[in-house]
Image (tube, rainbow, N blue to C red):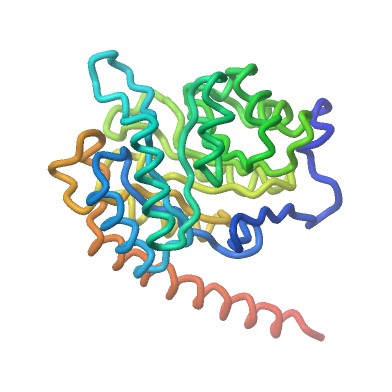
Amino acid sequence: MKNLQLAGAKEPGARTVIEVRGVRLGEEFVVVAGPCAVESEDQVVRTAVAVKEAGAKMLRGGAFKPRTSPYSFQGLGLKGLKILDKARRETGLPIITEVIDTRDVSWVGEYADVLQIGARNMQNFSLLREAGKSGRPVLLKRGMYSTLEEWLNCAEYILAEGNPNVILCERGIRTFETYTRNTLDLSIVPAVKMVSHLPVLVDPSHGTGVLGLIEPMSLAALVAGADGLEIEVHIDPPSAWSDKDQQLTPEAFGRLMRKLEILRETMAGLDARAAETAAP
């Protein structure tokens, strides 16, 4: 990976920490949660309150939704951004939302704390450059057919514009498997940390598309070394306008958050015991 002048690892163990309204990605384990799409003020604010109570540090929600079919719901646009802003003011949670067009970067950045570049746009180089110029932190999702090197080179486009705040997100890749929506490649998490200093999140919602797999893959992502998770949560998943089969209820999300905390404590204990055993 000779071309990674900025995304490549600097010193052994050196990690970039990105601060967003007091949340330190890359230093603390951060869970980003919220609905797939912004549908109404009531839906987003109630979801935001619920995920914050459960321990989420940031709110996700799509005001723009790039969809496979042009006839599917495409998002509320500016109205959706204003709803996210209302949820942020109600809860204090920073917001991550997707931008899909170079013409929208500057004004979406007026509302978003973090600009998300989705898998379909990972190699939209003009969009990457504009996001880099915005100065806003950027969450870059891995393309569904992309290698690790291709993904990091796309991060390089953002970094090369003078924006050091890039967060990577593994969201599953397309393979021959049809049971899951995508194949969640958790091996990419430690691989990223071997060759790059950038923080990396995992999205088990899009990575599997199967409700029953979100919890085990979230726990596995923590063990694999992920710096956080991006999880879809909806107050009433059956009524969701998009991705209703992969959105957790607030109750299910709360149970998952408790398990994640127990697992983190267990891992810390194992690390301490291993250090004691290794001591002369």
251 relative position to 51: left or right: left
Residue visible at 43% across and 58% down? 89
Q: Percent from the top left, x then y, of residue 278?
A: 74, 79
Quadrant containing the N terminus is top right
Of residues 273 and 106, the one nearer the viewer is 106
Residue visible at 59% across and 29% down? 106
Quadrant containing the C terminus is bottom right
Of residues 271 and 235, the one nearer the viewer is 235
73 relative position to 257: left or right: left
84 relative position to 278: left or right: left
Residue visible at 52% across and 36% down? 116
Q: Residue furthest top?
A: 70
Of residues 164 and 254, the one nearer the viewer is 164
Count of labels shown? 0
Picture quadrant where residue 172 is located: top left
**In the depicted structure, whether residue 115 falls above or below residue 153:** below
**In the depicted structure, whether residue 89 falls above or below residue 70:** below
**In the depicted structure, whether residue 19 falls above or below residue 157:** below
Q: Percent from the top left, x then y, of residue 178?
A: 29, 27
**In the depicted structure, whether residue 54 falls above or below residue 193:** below
Residue visible at 65% across and 43% down? 191
Q: Percent from the top left, x then y, of residue 249?
A: 22, 56
Q: Residue furthest left?
A: 238
Picture quadrant where residue 238 is located: top left
Picture quadrant where residue 83 is located: top left
Q: Percent from the top left, x then y, of residue 194?
A: 72, 46
279 relative position to 209: left or right: right
Of residues 85 and 172, the one nearer the viewer is 85
